[in-house]
Image: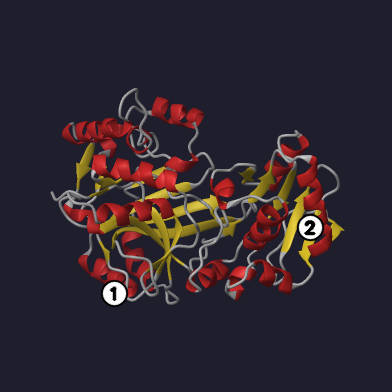
Amino acid sequence: MADVQPLHALHYDLGRVGGLQPVAAPPYDVIDARQRAELVARSPYNVVEIDLPQNGGDPYAHAADVLRGWTTDGIVVRDPRPALWALAQDYTGPDGRARTRHGVFARVRVEDYGPGRIRPHERTHPGPKEDRLRLTRATRANLSPIFSLYDDPAGAAWRALAPHLQGEPWGEVTDSDDTRHRVWRVEDVAAIAAVREALAGVELLIADGHHRYETARVYAQEPGAAPGSDHVLMCLVALQDPGLTVFPTHRLVLGLDEARKAALREALERDWDSEPADELEPASSDAVRIGYYDGGGARMLTLKDPAIAAAALPGKPEPYRRLDTAVLEALLLKGALGMTEDDISHLDGLDYARTAAQARERVDAGDADAAFFMAPTPVSQVRDVAAAGENMPPKSTYFFPKVLTGMVFNPLEES
């Protein structure tokens, strides 16, 4: 069962840095070199200086030195009392609809994956885990939160916090996607107890931050790990929250020779019904449907028979065999195109696009040979696949908006 606790947070002294706007940043793994430079130009105290460190020597030692200096100078301060931090994110999704998603920052005990505890939902790659592990060793802090989901049909956890969110938020930032992030610090002992009680028996499903969680598991077992390493910083969102949405990530295939193009055409004709389509993004449905574009007319592909997926995914549970990203991977990426797990992990001949327009533009520009357009995965299907003990292929889900880095940190050292 999840052990959720308040934290003696490290956080910016907003009076010293001009509020959250200059110092917060997206998660490290979505920041390119241009955006990092823009963030550093915004403030010398922007969180990328420690969460995405770059210097001519050891970037991890640099991050630790910077964080230590900020703490000494009072740029970053540590709370003397434990608190939960409530988050409201007002956003307009890729579908054009306005929503608000609610979450709470807390410390959660690090456990092995398993039923009733914590579950992943996507496969991970080794490179990012090693990077985050070296950063954690150096800074001895969780700088970026893990985004996890919990089951709370009655809404008890957020209801306990809501009365304490009537005033102005502690901090506020609007990101480059025009998402407004507001965060409140909640010290009330009764409210904290009510949240902990509501979450005491839940299973947590990691939505975003698998590499960070697996890093936390490894670090907690290392000799010399900081005393607080048995808990990790999470942002917890209820599965029933009306602002929780999942959007698709589309696939691009690159560098195909004529033989592989022919193999792809043969597989499409054999296993899929094809019809012209105006919309490339399929709606969620019981059938496995995938949009397809190779520079000619846009097509909608429908798997001819569920037995085809069952044969391609032997031993996999039924929820996994209905997952469009898994069927695409098995039948087309690995099957027709001969990609290996290593190819997929290292993006050898494969790339991703957040929007249908981006994917189509890449094909039209000759940068990709073909694009596959995925349906949004319902949250219920994400949960069903995880409950069956399976991890989805990478980038099967796109939880929007992201949880920013820099609003609150979890120190692993004792005060």
270 or 34: nearer the viewer: 270
Query: Disc 1 or disc 2, which is closer to the eye?
Result: 2
Here the colouring is: secondary structure
Q: Are marks 1 and 2 in contact (CB under 8 Å)?
A: no
The numbered disc on residue 197 is 1
Q: Nearer the viewer, residue 312 or 321?
A: 312
Element at badge 1?
A: helix
Locate residue 208 relative to residue 85 in the image: left or right: right
Which disc is residue 267 wearing? 2
Task: Count the numbered circles shown.
Answer: 2
Asked if residue 96 lies left or right of residue 414, the reply is right
Dot 1: few (<14), some (14–19), or many (≥20) neighbours within 10 Å? some
Pick the front one: 222 or 356: 222
Instruction: Give coordinates of residue 14: x percent, y percent.
Output: 29, 38
x and y, in percent, of residue 237 in the image: 42, 62
Q: Quadrant of residue 306?
A: bottom right
> Which residue is rendered at x = 79% and y = 57% of the image?
267
Front-lying residue, 174 or 215: 215
Image height of 59 relative to 137, above or below: above
Q: Quadrant of the N terminus?
A: bottom left
Q: Quadrant of residue 313?
A: bottom right
Is residue 99 found left or right of 409 in the rendered image?
right
Q: Secondary structure at mark 2?
A: helix
Q: Residue furthest left?
A: 415
Q: For marks 1 and 2, give the CA distance.
A: 52 Å
- The amino acid at mark 1 is Glu
Expressed as whole percent of the image width and height from the top left, the position of residue 368 reads 71, 39
Seen at 59% across and 66% down, the residue is: 378
Q: Looking at numbered disc 2 in the image, what kind of residue is underneath it? A: Ala
Q: Residue sitting at 47 percent across and 47 percent down?
A: 180
As displayed, is residue 235 above or below residue 179?
below
Q: Residue at x 51, y 74 (%)?
A: 388
